[in-house]
Image (spheres, rainbow, N blue to C red):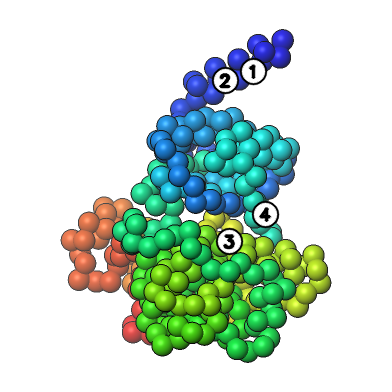
Amino acid sequence: MADRDDSQKKSEAKRRPLHNIYGKEILKKRLEAENFTRTTLSFYRYVILENPDELRNRLYAEWDALGVLGRIYIAHEGINAQLSVPSHNLNSFRENLDSRKEFKDMPFKIAVQDDHGSFLKLDLKVRKKIVADGLEDGAFDVTNVGTHLSAEEFNRHLEDGKSIVVDVRNHYESEIGHFENAILPQSDTFREEMQMLLELLNGKEDQKILMYCTGGIRCEKASAWLKHHGYKDVNQLHGGIIAYAHEVADKGLESKFKGKNFVFDGRLQEAIGNEIISTCHQCGEKSDRHVNCANPGCHILFIQCESCSEKFEGCCTEECRTVLHLSKEEQKEIRKGKLNENRFFTKSRIRPKVSELYRNQ
């Protein structure tokens, strides 16, 4: 009977489409109707994967059957995953990973906060790299990474004041939360930051460098990049901010991280402390509320307080609010760039900085 059940499950998995076929509203309703809890987690591993396309299809079928939602990148160099698993299927998901030698004993980073809305669908993509660094393959040894530090060790080095602390995240992430006295590169992408690091740390090759990011994966690349360029004492926070928050809570340590941790899912942030260290890009009041501009042709990511959200109808500028009230045909013309003498259209979701746009009006 068990063999027949296993065979039936495999047959059903094969019949499922290997991509999402539902619209956003349907996906939202399905998620809201769930009567079980979910666990949001992330993991990554640099490991040679011989056939990423075939692996992607197998994983999609197996994980879809377990109710997994999330965003996963697969490449020849490894896997990078942020996902949500039905809590009752977490052990089965672990067993699924362990069944492949490349993913066996994968460390999970469990989210600090979980509101059941981190992801709407399962999205597995094959990429050239699991983190877009803009560098050629083989340009440096990605396995020669920095020394991994626990939260306790990281705190100790922060307290002695002899280290240079570097945030290896984008400006919109560090804006709402970061470690005390950290260098905060004003980058839009990790690709930009890799080049900025060499400029910001020029002449500091012999000093102790402390690096951190959300979950650790960007520090793996960045620390190897610095070591390749002659930096001798490169260190990184093991497991990133997510693991740091758990260790601080478990061991009763003082948290040196101020503000919120930006996350790349529907939550957009999780609280590490109670401080709000950022301000609304429109009025300057304290706020750490990230939103996307309500103008579909803009969709820029920015910080907006509740009051300005009501005033500007969720838009980043008066211009975008004007566009929001145009007909769909006129909005379409603007998105095509035919009316781009105005500043309504941008292909980037984070450029230019809204605070600068607003000041220039």
State the CA–CA distance, disc 1 to disc 3.
Answer: 35 Å
Dot 3 or dot 4, earlier in sequence: 4
How crowded is the residue under tag 2: few (<14 C-alpha within 10 Å), some, or many (20+)? some
Placement of 5 over or under 90, stated as above or below: above
Mark 2 = which residue? 10
Dot label at residue 99: none
Kind of residue indicated by mark 3: Gly
Residue 272 x/y as whole percent: 68, 70
Residue nearest the viewer, comparing 156 with 290: 156
Q: Are marks 1 and 2 in contact (CB under 8 Å)?
A: yes
Q: Position of residue 163 (x, y in %)?
A: 58, 85
Quadrant location, the N terminus: top right
Residue nearest the viewer, comparing 202 with 280: 202
For residue 142, what is the image quadrant? bottom left
Instruction: Indicate which disc, 4 or 2, sits on the residue closer to the N terminus.
Output: 2
Position of residue 232 in the picture relative to residue 91 (left or right): left
Dot 4 and dot 1 residues touching (CB under 8 Å) = no
Q: From what the image shows, is residue 169 above or below residue 84?
A: below
* Marker disc for residue 215: 3
Crowdedness of circle 4 by 10 Å Cα count: few (<14), some, many (20+)?
some
Q: Earlier in the sequence, mark 3 or mark 2?
A: 2
Q: Which disc number belongs to residue 110?
A: 4
Tell me the kind of residue under disc 4.
Ile
Q: Give the position of the C terminus as an image quadrant.
A: bottom left
Query: At 55% across and 82% down in the image, what residue appears?
Result: 208
Specify the amino acid type for callout 1.
Asp
Location of residue 352 with respect to 123 vertically, above or below: below
